[in-house]
Image (tube, grey):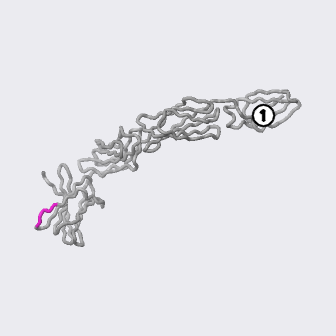
Amino acid sequence: RDTVYVGLYTASGGDVSISGGVTFDPSQLTLTCISTGGPATTVTWTRDSTTVTQGTQTVLNDPVTAQYTHTLTVTTGGEYTCTVANNKPSSASATITVTGTGPPTNVAARQTNPTSILVEWTPSSDATGYTIHYDSSEGPSGSVSIDGDSTNSYTLENLQNGETYTISIVATSANLPSQVVTAGMAVGLVPGNPELVRSSTSTDSITISVGFPAGSVVDSYVVMWTSVECSDNGMMTVDGSPATYTIMGLEEGISYNITVRASNNAGSGNSTSITVRTNEAAPNGAPNSVTEVSAAPNSITVGWEEVDCLLRNGMITGYTAQALRNGMVEATANVVVMLDKPLSLD
C-alpha cells in the first residue's frame, strides 16, 4: 500500500520533540504523531479542542533514539492536536488540519404520521450524498444512505410509534464525511389524530366511537366535554384505547363540544373534536320574572325572562300565557315567540 504524507509539523518541549504527519490509504485516514527524546507517558489527541483519544496506538520504533509513533484513525475533518508528555514539567504538541466534507445545516425533524419522521436540511456545497442515523432506546434504530448533492429531505418510515428518536445526519463525498449534525430536538412518535363518530345519544348521555390511524400506540386518551349553551363541562382519562366511550350525567337537549387527545410514552398527540346534542325533554323550569308591561281596557301585555339554561332541556319553541279571574281561565294565548319578547292577552 502506498503511503502519502501530507504536511509536517515539529514542536519540542522538555525532553520531548514531536512531529506529525497524515497517512492516507483507501480504507482509512490515519494521523501519525512521532515523538522523540524520552518515553511518552501521556498522549492526548483532540479534535477542535475536544478530546478524542479513543483508538490511539503507541509503538516504540527506535529504542536508541527513543522514537515513538502515536496513531489515531479519524473519520471526520477538523483541527487535530497530539500532545505528548512524560514526567518532566513541560510537554510537546503538534497540530494538523484535516479537511472533510462540509456539514449540512438547519437540520430539523418532525413526525408526519404515526410511524414516519420527515428529516429536512440545507445541503452542503460539496456533498455527494448523506447518511441519516436514527436511534431509539427500545424501537428500531439504524441508518440510511442517500445519493444526491442537492437532496434536502428524506422520510424515515416503518418506525415504532410510542418511541422517541434522535436523528442525526452526515454529509458524504470523496473526502472524509462531515461532522455529525443532530436535529435540535428528539422526535417522539405520538398517536395519530383521533377519529371521532357520534354513536348514540339519550337525554343525559352521549356515546362516541373512537378510532386511531394505523400504527398508533395508545396508552390512554382524555375525553373533554363542554356545553355550547350552558355552563356544563367535564373531563375523563380512559386507560387503553377502547373503541367507544359513553359520557354520562349530561343535561337534556344541550349541544356539547367533545374533544379527545391520546397519549403514549412519547407524549400526547393532537386533539380532535365533534359537536353532539343530547336528546330533548320537556322543560322542567318556568320563565323568570313575569311582569306586566302595559294594560288597556280589554288587554294586558306581559313580559318575562327566559327559562334558566339547565332547565330548558332543549330549544324553547313557544309559550302559553293565561289570564285567570277567580281561578277561571278567561283568556289564553299560545304563540311561538322569541325569548324576552312581550305577549299580549286580549
Q: Residue 137: x and y, percent? A: 36, 46
Q: Residue furthest left?
A: 64
Position of 157 with respect to 42 (left or right) is: right
Q: Quadrant of residue 152?
A: top left
Position of 119 with respect to 96 (left or right) is: right
Q: Residue 194: x and y, percent? A: 48, 36
Q: Answer yes or no: is residue 137 visible.
A: yes
**Looking at the image, residue 5 lies above or below residue 293:** below
Q: Quadrant of residue 233?
A: top right
Position of 239 with respect to 277 (left or right) is: left
Frontmost residue, 99 versus 342: 342
- Quadrant for the C terminus, please: top right
Q: Residue 279: x and y, percent? A: 63, 30
Which amino acid, mark 1?
Pro
The structure residue drawn at horizontal position 61% and vertical position 36%, both measured from the top left corner, is 249
Q: Answer yes or no: is residue 7 visible.
A: no
Instruction: State yes or no: residue 247 in magenta.
Output: no
